[in-house]
Amino acid sequence: MKRSTIIAVAVAATVAVSAAGCSTASEAEGTADDPVTLTFWGAYGNGGNSTQAEVLNDTLIPSFEKANPEIKVEYVDIPYDDLLKKLTTSAAGDELPDLVRADLGWVPKFADLGVLVALSDEMDNFQELADATYPGVLSTNLYDGKYYGLPLDTNTRVLITSQEALDAQGLDAPPATFEEFAAGADALSDSGMQVFADGGLGAWNISPWIWSGGGAITDDEVTTSTGYLDSDESVAAVQMLVDLYANDQISNGIIGNAGATSTSEGLPGGNYANILDGPWMNGIWSEQFPEFTPIYAPMPAGDGGSVSVVGGEDIVLTSTSEHKDAAMKFIEFTQSEEFQMALVPTGQLTVISALGDQQVELLPYLELFTDQLATAKARVAIPQASEVDTILNEALVPAFEGTVTVRDALTSAAQKIDELLAEE
């Protein structure tokens, strides 16, 4: 029996027992004198960055508890790299918390295991809350026709360049289209500066180019990749990058060369003219390269427009929670202006579209990211999403190295993704 199957069986048994034996407990409500305690797992302090965890623990949770004295919230910070493993083992051992701040790609995986509550079925005001969020972010919670969470925070990638790069290309503004982007490479041919750099060929990296080129990874219903990933539009978008790579205009970091200068160092260092990255880079550069002034611009547009990729986290409620009503009150609180805006200064973009302008007033450099979110899309939302990244990377590296054609690489990848989709 496969490990995933063993976990699923164990979890199903756990959920069945819990559902049968805890119906009264699941409705238990606390009082101000005897509050219920919600456990909430997340990685706000990932990498030793305490800023976000401090805002949560010192400001937001106390505010929620003051307004809801019958509920206490115990936040447990877990390093990001350990959180998925801990959630997986805890799911099989009936040790999940009430609430989880889950990476966008994890929701389908745990929904498939049967350990999450379908909020679209259980929250009376789910649709009202869902309608207030960006569609691309909300879609990361959709699995098998139901929504198993709500967006908690988000981010996306935009084009980032420098004045040095614009001067080297003879441009007054960042490249707005595929054509302008490719033309910039010609202007850099003798400069020692490459037109683009990225750190891989997974869905996070390659999807913005495919979508903006008018292609797709799968159909809208996520039932097939063949005919979409290997479409003429997808092939043309990737071919543009492959041609630039063949002319030494894209860093070999994109195919996994660990010795390549990183994007975070290569842009301020004058090695690269453009990268795609997120809002967190502003803080990194302000510390490491205080003299560097990044210039933000939308993802260059192709036949499909300017389309980037959604990142971030969702908040989910576990099926074994004994305090579901209290947990849903906290979930509702996370969608409030108070919660969302308190975390913006820490590098988290709001998931509430109506707060976009307020976010930009607070931190003007977020304007491009806020605008890009309006058209940003989610990666393929299936339990095996990480395998899609592996398939894309393994298929495309040979294409960049010139040992297979782009069409053959994408056709092969589409067939393998179809096999994953057939398991659904």
Image (cartoon, rainbow, N blue to C red):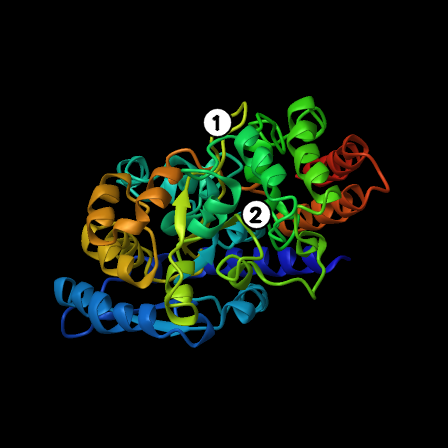
Q: Which residue is mark 2?
A: 204
Residue 297 visible in this rendered orientation of the protein: yes
- Amino acid type of the residue tagged 1 in the rendering: Gly
Indicate the quadrant containing the C terminus: top left, top right, bottom left or bottom right: top right
Query: Residue 189 vs residue 302: left or right?
Result: right
Q: Residue at x 40, y 61 (%)?
A: 292
- Mark nearer the viewer, 2 or 1: 1
Q: How many other residues sit within 10 Å of disc 1, few (<14), some (14-19) or many (≥20)?
A: some
Q: Are marks 2 and 1 in contact (CB under 8 Å)?
A: no
Secondary structure beneath disc 2? helix
Q: Which residue is mark 1?
A: 305
- Amino acid type of the residue tagged 2 in the rendering: Trp
Could you tell me residue 312's position as x and y percent?
Answer: 43, 52
Could you tell me residue 16's position as x and y percent?
Answer: 52, 55
Secondary structure beneath disc 1? loop
Residue 120 vs 165, above or below: the answer is above
- Quadrant of residue 282 within the rendered picture: bottom left
Query: Residue 315 vs residue 32: left or right?
Result: right
The circle on residue 165 is none
Q: Residue at x 70, y 33 (%)?
A: 239
